[in-house]
Each structure stands twice: as structure tokens, then as C-alpha cells.
Image: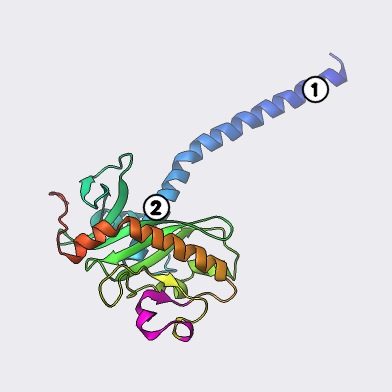
Amino acid sequence: MSDQLKSIAFTAVVALVCSLMLTAAASGLKERKLRNVAVDRQKNILKAVGLVDPGEKVPVDRIERLYGENIRCYSLDGTGDIVTADSNDGALPVCFYVKERQPAAYILPVNSRGLWGKIHGYLAIENDGKTVAGFSVYSHNETPGLGGEIEKPWFQKDFIGKKIVDTSGNFAPVRIAKGKAAEVVAPDKLPNVVDGISGATLTGKYLSGGLKDLLQEYEGLSKQFRDGAVTLPSGS
């Protein structure tokens, strides 16, 4: 065999071995990657209801334990009634923070437009159906230092205690101001508005729109909570 053929054969064998190694590595890491994604979402659900502090480094086993002990997830029909513990086509996913077998808060999945892509996170509402319990973000493409501040504790903490109804009890979704809320919003609107991010007006605008659409979609469930008419399935 000529030197040229030997070189070609050697290159082909190396390429084949590398390809097999990469395929094996990808297959072996797939399960770990999927688990990491699931744990990250669980952590953000826990953050939204205050069971994990923003910025806190929590071991995976603790996240899974807290989630298993406190969170129950279901699906809702178009009127806001709980229909199943599994997601069905056309049903809305929702999770509940359960204390002593009663819902202390409900957690809604945020899937909002952002300036550069989708913003994914969770918005938790207290069991009065009116008050925001917390907000978290687990995925976004916003600009670091500008719109990317939506992932920072200072921004997320400002959602706590805000309202999704006005002073008359009518639907009024929480939204983000263009600057400091107290400086640009009338006093009677302040309960529904969080401080904006300097230099990130469009991120705030798009996220406000996404939260409005989300809360409108789940308004049936929120009304049931305001009326004290929510009961979780037996065994929760």
C-alpha cells in the first residue's frame, strides 16, 4: 500500500473513531442534560413562591426534594377548572404551591416575547387571586446589563406584593414602568406596576404584554381563587 493510501486510511479510521466517541458522549450526556433542564425549571418555580432565595446555590437533591414536597402540577380547561394531573391538548398547565393540602399560591408559566427572543419564567399568584407572590426567569436572550436585568433579584423582587386587579377588583395585570414607577405612574396605579429597567424600554414593553396575555388566559382560575372556590383533586 502506498504512503498516500495509508494516510487516507489512517485519516478515515481516526474520523470514524472520533465520530463514534462523539455519538456515545452525546447519548450518555443527554439524560443528564434533560435532568439539568428539569431541575433548573423546578428551581425557578420554587423561587417564584419563595422556597428558594434568588441567587442562592442550592444542591440538586434539595431542589428535587423541595419541589416534590411542595409543588403539584395540573392542567386547566378553558374555564379555569382543574381537569387532570397530566397536560392535554388545549389544556393550560399550572402548578400549585401546596401547604397542608391547600393551595397557598398558583404558578403560571411565562412565555413572553422579548427584544431578542423569548422570555421564559414563572409568575406566582397568592391564593387570594389578586397578589403576586413572586416572579422568576430561567431563559432569555436580552442584552446583558440592559434587558438582561430581568434575571436579577432586584428586578424580580419588585413583583412581590403587586396586584393583578385594580382598586375596584377588576382585571388589571401587573406591568413594567418606563423608569421608576413612582415617578411616571399615578398613585392609584402603583399597586400594579413594577420599576422599569434603565435602557431596556422595549424589553419592559414586550414582557408587560406577555404578562397581560398570560394573566388574561388564566383569569378564570384567578376568579375562582378570588371567590374561594378552588379545590385541588383528592390526594394532593
Q: Residues within 10 Å of mark 1 (few under 14, many from 20)?
A: few
Judged from the image, the secondary structure of the residue bearing numbered disc 2 is: helix
Q: Note whether 32 is above or below 186 in the view shown.
A: above
Q: Say which residue label 1 marks.
A: 8
Quarter of the picture holding the N terminus? top right
At horizontal 44% and vertical 85% (from top left) the residue drawn is: 182
Q: Position of residue 200 (x, y in %)?
A: 57, 70
Q: In this rendering, does residue 110 appear at all?
A: yes
At horizontal 41% and vertical 62% (from top left) the residue drawn is: 211
Q: Main secondary structure of the magenta part?
A: helix
Is 189 in the magenta?
A: yes
Q: Nearer the viewer, residue 210 or 121?
A: 210
Task: Describe the colour scheme in one phrase.
Answer: rainbow
Q: Position of residue 203 (x, y in %)?
A: 54, 66
User: In the image, what residue type sits under mark 1?
Assistant: Ile
Q: In this rendering, does residue 43 appear at all?
A: no
Judged from the image, the secondary structure of the residue bearing numbered disc 1 is: helix
Quadrant of the rendered structure where residue 57 is?
bottom left
At horizontal 25% and vertical 57% (from top left) the residue drawn is: 220
Q: Which is nearer the N-term, disc 1 or disc 2? A: 1
Q: Nearer the viewer, residue 10 or 114?
A: 114
Point out the stretch of residues depicted in magenta: 183-195
Q: Say which residue label 2 marks.
A: 39
Q: Residue furthest left?
A: 234
Q: Note whether 7 is above or below 135 in the view shown.
A: above
Quadrant of the rendered structure where residue 190 is?
bottom left
